[in-house]
Structure formats: structure tokens, C-alpha cells
Image: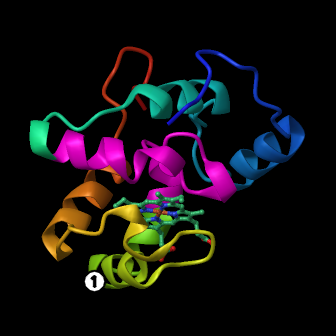
Amino acid sequence: MNRPPSAPRHLHLPAVIGLVALLTACSDTPPDPASLQAYARQAMPEEAALAATYTRSCQACHATGTSRAPLTGDTQAWGRLLNKGMDTLVNNTIQGFGGMPPMGLCMDCDREDFAALIRFMASEPKQPGGSS
Ligand code: HEC
């Protein structure tokens, strides 16, 4: 919310790179962590209502990776999560999961809202350079 415009965040780069290398071991076009972070910071659902919901809830963590939240647009991370099934992911969001508070801070979201938000965060980055 009150993030300063471009405060340099301390990143554990070797750890991030190691993790990405691990996750992309089977892919010949590994996403570079910096562009993933840059995409996540400004990504927004196209639909206005969903964008508003995203802005006041999930974005706080999933746009920055706070407490290791999977980044919006990190299709590798979300791909693995989606293997659990959308129902499980929605249930985990409602109950809270690891570092994520119950309801992902969206108290008036229903299951469909959560599924739409998850689908958005899990979708391929749409921007030049974000192709894969
Ligand atoms: C306060 C920070 C925060 C907010 C706000 C937040 N999340 Fe999360 N979310 C996390 C963290 C941290 C994790 C990783 C939890 C872990 O694996 O320990 C996570 C993980 C998830 C997961 C994966 C759960 C699983 O089964 O592995 C889903 C799905 C998810 N978030 C959806 C959402 C949605 C949808 C919203 C908005 C309505 C949201 N989150 C808002 C922090 C947050």
C-alpha cells in the first residue's frame, strides 16, 4: 500500500536464481527473475471489478512476493500450485495458508471471485518481452 515509489528492496538474488533454475530445469527459456518481478508489480486484471478487488487484497503480497507469496505471472510457480486443483487453492485461500491470512484479505470475495483472481495471477504475462 504505502510502498515508496522505487525503494530498492533487498533481494536474496542467489537464492532467487537458484530457485528459478531449479523450477525451470525442464524448460529451455527460463524467465528472468527481474522481469518477473517487474511484471508482477504492475500487472492488473483487465476487468475493472476484478482489478479493484485485486488491488485491495491479493496485490499487496502477490505483486511483491511478500512472505514468499507466489508472484503474479509466475506461471511456473502457479502451474505447480494449480496441480492441487482449483477447489483446493480456493479452500486454502479462504482458510488461510502458510503466510497468507484467511480470505487473502478479501472479506467479501466468494469462491468465484477467488478462482478468477487465482486464474489471473496464474496467467501468462501479457507484455512485450514477457513471451515464453
Ligand atoms: C498478506 C499477504 C497475502 C495476501 C493479501 C494474499 N496472499 Fe495469497 N499467499 C500469500 C503467501 C505468503 C502465500 C504462500 C503461502 C505458503 O506457501 O506458505 C500465498 C499463497 C497463495 C495461494 C497458494 C495456496 C496453496 O495452496 O499453495 C493462493 C491460491 C493464493 N495465495 C491466493 C490469493 C488470493 C486469491 C488473494 C487475494 C484475494 C491472496 N492470495 C492474497 C500471501 C498473501
Q: Residue drawn at (77%, 44%), measured in percent from left and top?
A: 16
Looking at the picture, how far across and down is residue 9, in whole percent?
A: 76, 29
Kind of element beneath mark 1: helix
Res 123 visible: no
Q: Quadrant location of the C terminus?
A: top left
Looking at the picture, how far across and down is residue 114, in whole percent?
A: 25, 66
Q: Is residue 5 left or right of residue 14?
A: left
Q: Does the magenta run of residues contain 55?
A: yes
**Most frequent secondary structure within the magenta stretch:** helix
Q: Splitting the image into 4 quarters, where does residue 118 fall?
A: bottom left
Crowding around mark 1 (Cα neighbors within 10 Å: few <14, some 14 to 19, many 20+) is few
76 lies above or below 113:
above
Q: Residue drawn at (58%, 32%), measured in percent from left and top?
A: 37
Q: Splitting the image into 4 quarters, where does residue 3 fall?
A: top right
Q: Is residue 26 left or right of residue 94?
A: right
Looking at the picture, how far across and down is residue 72, in whole percent?
A: 44, 45
Q: Does the magenta run of residues contain 32?
A: no
Looking at the picture, how far across and down is residue 21, in whole percent?
A: 74, 46
Residue receiving disc 1: 87
Instruction: Single out the residue that lies furthest toward the front.
Output: 2
Amino acid tagged 1 = Asp
75 lies above or below 93:
above
Q: Which residues are magenta?
A: 50-78
